[in-house]
Image: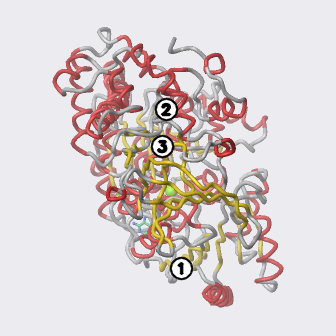
Amino acid sequence: MLKTSLSQILKTTKAHLTKLGKLEVYSVEDLLNFFPRAIESTEITSHFANIQLGAKNTISGRLTDFRKEKTPRGKSLGRAALILDDESVIDVIWFQIPYILKNLKDETRVFLVGKIDRNYGKIQISNPEIHLDANVHVGKLRAIYPESPPITSKWLREKISGLLLLAKDFPETLPPQIREEEHFLGKSDAILTIHAPASAEMWNQARKRLGFEEVFEIQTRVMREKFLREKEIKNPHKIQFDAEATKRNLELVPFTLTLAQKKVLYEILKDFERDRPMHRLMQGDVGSGKTIVGFLASLPIVKSGAQAVFLAPTEILAKQHFTNALKFFPSHISIELLTGSVTAGTKKKIKTRLHNGDINILIGTHAVLTEDTEFQNLGFAVIDEQHRFGVQQRTILAQNQAHVLAMTATPIPRTLALTIYGDQDISVISELPPGRKSIITRIVADPKTISLCNHFIDDQITKGRQIFWICPLIDESDKIEAKNVKEEFDRIAHETFPNRKVEFLHGKMRPKEKDSIMTRFRNHEFDILVSTSVIEVGVDIPNATVMVIENSERFGLSQLHQFRGRIGRNEFQSYCFLMVGKPDDANKQRLRALEKSNNGLFLAEIDLKLRGMGELYGVRQSGIPDFKCADLNDLEMLQKARDWAIKILKEDLNLSAYPLLKKRIEQETVYF
Ligand code: ADP
Ligand code: MG
């Protein structure tokens, strides 16, 4: 029954079914797995003394004196009076008149749910829901679901309550030991309770169990992959740490490494000595100098006769790594670039040479990761901004028993690192190279400040600096109200800065066009680049000192921090201006954090608290679904889930005793 399709079992409209499909809700099981985000009490009050002013109340009484009126502007509204059991009278007002009122007899007993306020001395309930009986909507605790029209909480409550009997068919998915020792509700009880709780305490119990399970399953999946990997794979590229050679290599670098860079390099080189291939995540703020660490680590690999590959998420970045690599590595090391825009003929040649071992270091994009790319002897893979790579692509890499170093500028809060990156060793580059000035960041909301800002930008251009101008969209959109590249380009180039040279860039342009724009920007052939977020990662334009971000409220703090990292890469003071669409307070408060802090990890932690995990930059792309119940700020629970996962796997790595758990975690392989 749980697998029954909703289109067979629900009486509803096509629009509702389509929307459910968009939410990936197709079967009874899916619908029962669609959890409410909160609950509210709808305890019925029929006495004036029990009413809470300024809050939502559920009141019962006799409805009388219903009439339609027009506002001075000609809109129709409905008015009535509700007589409570103590004979006190509440004013009722509807701005949209409920259909039910059409044939309602005077003095019928009704239940109203809505906010009650004092209005010009009268007690008024505005726009209340109206019910004729106590039902799933009134009288007890009720669930509030995430809404997306036409799917409302009311609709979900009704449909789910009709199917809730089937919750008993949910099989138990947590291992019995865990359930017993942690005193968790059973699965079917938890499902039943989360939709229709008898008390707030029970609802929390249900959430606790379901939230634990979410984290536990991910932990089991991640740790199992680690254990399997460690069981099967030896380290074919064991390289003894050589202090003398490392010292000599450091002399190839035109600057002095920071202490943090040296430490991480050492951690990597020590990993090469171990019995298992390295699996390490290097975390470091934008501009902290991760690339050079990756370069230095590949020298002993190449010396040992193995190959290294550098993967970047965009052509622009791959090319930049390539240019830097040509400068850095001694000329006897052969380096090639392989991206989507390389011609088929050249690609074939590169792949042949790669297979023959004539190429020591390959730098490229996703284009490298096709089935027909065969390395002669891959020893080291460096993945820049790993979350931008798909699961499948990473699996291809894992087949080679190479050391893997993932690099990311996305700061990962500790709790999250524990949860989804639990199987990797983590290195952090905790300081920036010396002499970097921190970026001055300001929110720009009102017209006067905007105008000042434009003057300032013009002045910077006169001083020879360049400007990044970021917009959320490429084209005008009828759905989303936000600035787009094409219109902004027109405005900036023709109205605001008619005397300056302006170009634009977005993700839908051909790679060749994008490349040429970036190259010309780097050569200072124009002053302002209007762009979508395609420039978000890695790109190095040292002469850019100003970044303007339109509709900054639409981005996560971590992402804004990433954008901001594109500037401030020189001796000049740099500035970041955060434009806002409609400055509402919550967003402003969030953005204020960006004005105050240059610490990526701190900002990511705020993001996690305020916007949840799904919004955290990089998480969505990682293939992990957003948690529905689990509270990622609950460190104790996360630790507990992790301990249990390890315990279960140590006893039974194959999960033979838990076929259901095994099936669930194998549904989708995620490889980090
Ligand atoms: P990210 O960590 O964001 O990838 P990059 O590796 O692109 O940073 O480095 C940013 C810039 O800083 C590059 O131009 C690089 O050459 C320079 N750089 C890296 N490390 C140092 C250092 N220790 N001292 C001075 N400059 C450095
Ligand atoms: Mg980088």
Nearest the viewer among 28 and 109 is 109
Classify 10 Å Cα crowding around label 1: few (below 14), some (14-19), many (20 and above): many
Question: Of discs 3 and 1, which sits in the foreground?
Answer: 1
Looking at the rendered image, the quarter that the C terminus falls into is top left
Of the two numbered discs 3 and 1 on the same chain, state the one appearing first in sequence. 3
Query: Label for residue 245?
Result: none
Taking depth in this image into account, of 60 and 28 the one nearest to the observer is 60
The residue positioned 47% from the left and 58% from the top of the image is 115
Q: Which image quarter: residue 255?
A: bottom left
The amino acid marked with disc number 3 is: Val
User: Residue at the location (29% across, 40% down)?
Assistant: 200
Ligand 2 within 8 Å of the CB at mark 2: no
Q: How many marks?
A: 3
Q: Residues within 10 Å of mark 2 (few under 14, many from 20)?
A: many
Residue for badge 3: 382
- The answer to whether residue 235 is seen in the rendering is no
Residue receiving disc 2: 34
> Residue 404 at x, y = what percent?
42, 37
First-in-chain label (2 vs 1): 2
Image location of residue 19, percent across then percent down: 66, 35
For ligand 2, tell me if the residue under mark 3 lies within 8 Å. no
Task: Please name the amino acid that badge 2 sits on.
Answer: Phe
Q: Is residue 235 above or below residue 537?
A: above
